[in-house]
Image (spheres, rainbow, N blue to C red):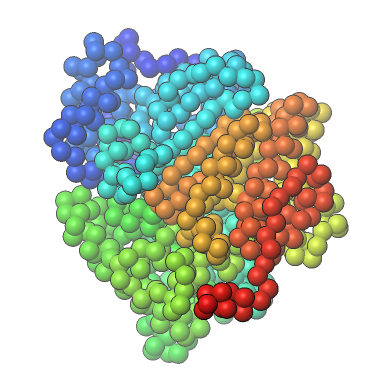
Amino acid sequence: MSSLKDVCSGLPLDPLPPNQGRDPSVPHAPVRAPNLTAEEERLALRNALRYFPPSHHATLAPEFAQELRQYGHIYMYRFRPTLPMRAYPIDQYPCRTRQAAAIMLMIMNNLDPAVAQFPQELVTYGGNGQVFSNWAQFRLVMHYLSEMSEEQTLVMYSGHPMGLFPSLPSSPRAIITNGMVIPNYSSRAQYEKMFALGVSMYGQMTAGSYCYIGPQGIVHGTMLTVLNAGRRYLGSGDLSGRVFVTSGLGGMSGAQAKAAVIAGCVGVIAEVDEAPLRKRHEQGWVMEVTSNMEHCIARIREAKSSKTPLSLGYHGNIVDLWERLLLEYERTGELLVDLGSDQTSLHNPFNGGYYPVQLSFRQANQVMVADPGRFKTMVQESLKRHVSAINKLADAGMFFWDYGNAFLLEAQRAGAQVGKVGGGATEFRYPSYVQHIMGDIFSLGFGPFRWVCTSGDPQDLAETDNIASRVLEEMSAHVTDDVRQQYDDNIRWIREAGKHKMVVGSQARILYSDQRGRVSIALAINRAVANGSVSAPVVISRDHHDVSGTDSPFRETSNVYDGSAFCADMAVHNFVGDAFRGATWVALHNGGGVGWGEVINGGFGLLLDGSAEAARRASLMLNWDVSNGVARRCWSGNSNAYETIQRTMEEDGLLRVTMPFPVRDERVLDRALQG
């Protein structure tokens, strides 16, 4: 077995490691169908071989060509380390700066089999959210980070380490971009070709920026979404006896089962792939599993009647489940579902993100490669059936929302009845959860703030939980009522988080907080590192799904109605602004969440090492990281954002934001346009 020192020593070339290929005992990414021409195949092979000296080309070229033709991509399995992938304590990484060690820890956490969806293909979540494009890139990145000084920055081009470049100690230690292609070429077909050629990569949100922390990263947001959906649609925050039906138990969607139980309802989650279903059950995220529809319906009735919180994983197609729930309603008049959504990976609908109801899981994986055109047609037919059942149940009183996975967007493209009469470009028959449930909390400055204890010690995580809880409790006495509701939800969350065994991989935590809360928590944790009550540095980050990080017209910015929902200035400025305000690393991606070409998002990581410099960086950067997005939302006309940024300017004399003047008399517009 290799060691961290071996993993960080660069490409093993003398001798080459044995080619062990793929391990058949672990889940693997669906086979890709990039439809390369003969000349493009030649180019893909040439591009892969440039990582290695010519003396090895005769050995590597045939196996790389086989990978390309068999799997649709060159993963370079030969160079996959034998060392178990996980977040080792930060002191174990060979390095010249702890900032680099923190990045290495986060990379290895992203590839931990307990965390990653398809670790051998370097996919963290979402079916195609890559950390790197191939294993040579992983080896080189780890080597560069181990040698990096605090006067160098690692430059990453879509998984490829361009190299270490001279910079300042105050500069980020890594600058990451993924999928930054010319807009006219940002199509799915172009993506498949560019990924196969090894020149671009889909980094999802937190996969290619090394900030993923397992499904816990979304479980809190999902819990808040379900709670707020109950308040909005059902008139109560008490969800006992209420049934929430959805689909997907993968990297992100796997949070739904745990969140449903924490929220107190009955969560029923359909999953066609047995591997993630069993994984979530073994991890304790899903309480029960069944592949029997009759048993599934019976358990829904029992749990609904007894008002017992339950997470039930149904091994089968979500369309079958929706149609059966409709049949039960038509037969008995009993509506068994109160809330509904979907988290299939519809950003990637034709390559494993969505499985059509007409085919079994195995059949679908075969057809998507053998006959992509037929597979696409079947996906779209399935989506129309999917929506038809939902529409009829919604007419009966079930409340459905789009969970930002491009479900309604792809359903509309398939011809399903999801249009909204008189709706704008980002509106459908059912609202995005951002538009109706969570969006205004972004305008208040709330979003998914997270941290990782680099010691790997659960005691450090427990201490940071206590710190965050104390900070929020102290602050909640001095905030407005709408902000206090969010604080109360998060205090409840952080008090309960340790009891629900949500840690998968690194010792990490997430909560939703506003600007003042994030800064205060970060500074308190930094002090705890300094005084030794937390034994090692802590990495702070956030999901790109946040106040400022993401321009996504069908999700994060779907409730921006001034015509700028399709503009990406905010995310780009977020990335650049975080970089020069002290982030340890920053990332800018095309395509996270709802898919390639549909969104631009930016993220960061920052190491809290207990120093005064770390405190200064955290304060400066986190204030900007939130205010940027609140200011943009204010300018778009959001009243919550207007009030939030006004209060922030009153607290910070250096902040001056251009404030909008509303049109108070619509007749002014009428007269001007009629004239």
Which percent across, then down, holds residue 610?
75, 28
Q: Is residue 257 visible?
A: no
Instruction: Please report the residue visible at 86 percent of the width from the left and 57 percent of the height from the top.
Output: 478
Q: Where is 450 relative to 331, above or below?
A: above
| Closest to the observer, 391 or 157 | 157
| Closest to the observer, 642 or 402 | 642
Instruction: Please report the residue visible at 35 percent of the width from the left and 30 percent of the height from the top.
Output: 134
Q: Is residue 621 visible?
A: yes
Which percent across, then down, holds residue 627?
68, 48
In the current view of this chain or complex, which residue is farthest to the left? Answer: 38
**Quadrant assignment, res 131:** top left
In the current view of this chain or complex, which residue is farthest to the front? Answer: 675
Which percent across, then down, holds residue 646?
76, 56
Quadrant that contains the N terminus: top left
- What is the number of callouts on the image? 0
Left or right of 199 in this view: 606: right
Q: Where is 67 relative to 629, above or below?
A: above
Q: Where is 397 relative to 532, above or below?
A: below
Left or right of 207 in this view: 320: left
**Quadrant assignment, res 91:** top right
Which percent across, then down, holds residue 357?
29, 66
